[in-house]
């Protein structure tokens, strides 16, 4: 009679060399810029690069709109540029939320992969 858990066997069978390569590509002490770069790869990498570009464009527009609001000479112009600043801030916030959620998802995925490898190694050690 074997003490092998069927779930552990399925995890061991599911782990491939690509999982080990994925874990090797992710360092333990990754900084924010490394994590941003890592999010540019994979199935949503194109969208992540596009979102990063849009975030830069929104940031430039935000700085310009703020400058125009500060230098406005009438209340109507101030109100228009001020509302533009608020709108761009909201857009920037939602975009950054998506980008950081993706980075957190990749971090959690790496932790799950590490657990899978540890379970597979423990299963091999018990056999």
Image (cartoon, helix red, strand yellow):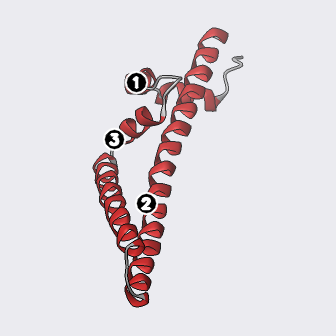
Q: Tell me what residue is drawn at x 69 percent, y 17 percent.
A: 2
Q: How many numbered marks have been drawn onto this rendered protein structure? A: 3
In the rendered structure, find residue 95 and report the number of the disc placed on it. Answer: 2
Q: Tell me what residue is drawn at x 37 percent, y 85 percent.
A: 77
Vertical placement of 59 versus 91: above or below?
Answer: above
Vertical placement of 61 versus 18: above or below?
Answer: below
Alpha-carbon span between mark 3 and mark 1: 13 Å
Q: How crowded is mark 2: few (under 14 residues within 10 Å), some or many (20 or more)?
A: some
Q: Position of residue 83 (x, y in %)?
A: 44, 80
Residue behind mark 1: 25
Mark 2 lies on a secondary structure that is helix
Q: Look at the image and tell me in which quarter the N terminus lies.
A: top right
Q: Where is residue 111 in the image (x, y as percent from the top left)?
A: 57, 32
Q: Which of 91 and 45 is in front in this view?
A: 91
* Disc number lying in front (2 or 3): 2
Q: Are marks 2 and 3 in contact (CB under 8 Å)?
A: no
Q: Tell me what residue is drawn at x 40 percent, y 24 percent.
A: 25
Alpha-carbon span between mark 1 and mark 2: 26 Å
Q: Residues within 10 Å of mark 3 (few under 14, many from 20)?
A: few
Mark 3 lies on a secondary structure that is loop
Q: Tell me what residue is drawn at x 41 percent, y 32 percent.
A: 34
Q: Which of 55 and 71 is in front in this view?
A: 71
In the rendered structure, find residue 42 and report the number of the disc placed on it. Answer: 3
Q: Which of marks 1 and 2 is nearer the N terminus?
A: 1
Q: Residue furthest bottom?
A: 76
Alpha-carbon span between mark 2 and mark 3: 19 Å
Vertical placement of 75 versus 106: above or below?
Answer: below
Q: Which of marks 2 and 3 is nearer the N terminus?
A: 3
């Amino acid at each position: 009679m074997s003490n092998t858990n069927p779930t552990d066997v399925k995890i061991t069978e599911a782990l491939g060399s690509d999982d080990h390569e994925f874990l090797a590509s992710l360092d333990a002490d990754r900084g924010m810029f490394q994590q941003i770069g890592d999010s540019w790869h994979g199935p949503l990498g194109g969208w992540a690069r596009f979102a990063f570009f849009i975030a830069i464009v929104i940031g430039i527009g935000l700085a310009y709109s703020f400058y125009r609001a500060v230098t406005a000479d009438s209340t109507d112009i101030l109100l228009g540029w001020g509302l533009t600043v608020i709108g761009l801030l909201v857009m920037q916030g939602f975009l950054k939320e998506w980008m950081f959620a993706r980075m957190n998802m990749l971090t959690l995925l790496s932790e799950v992969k590490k657990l899978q490898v540890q379970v597979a190694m423990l299963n091999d050690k018990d056999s």
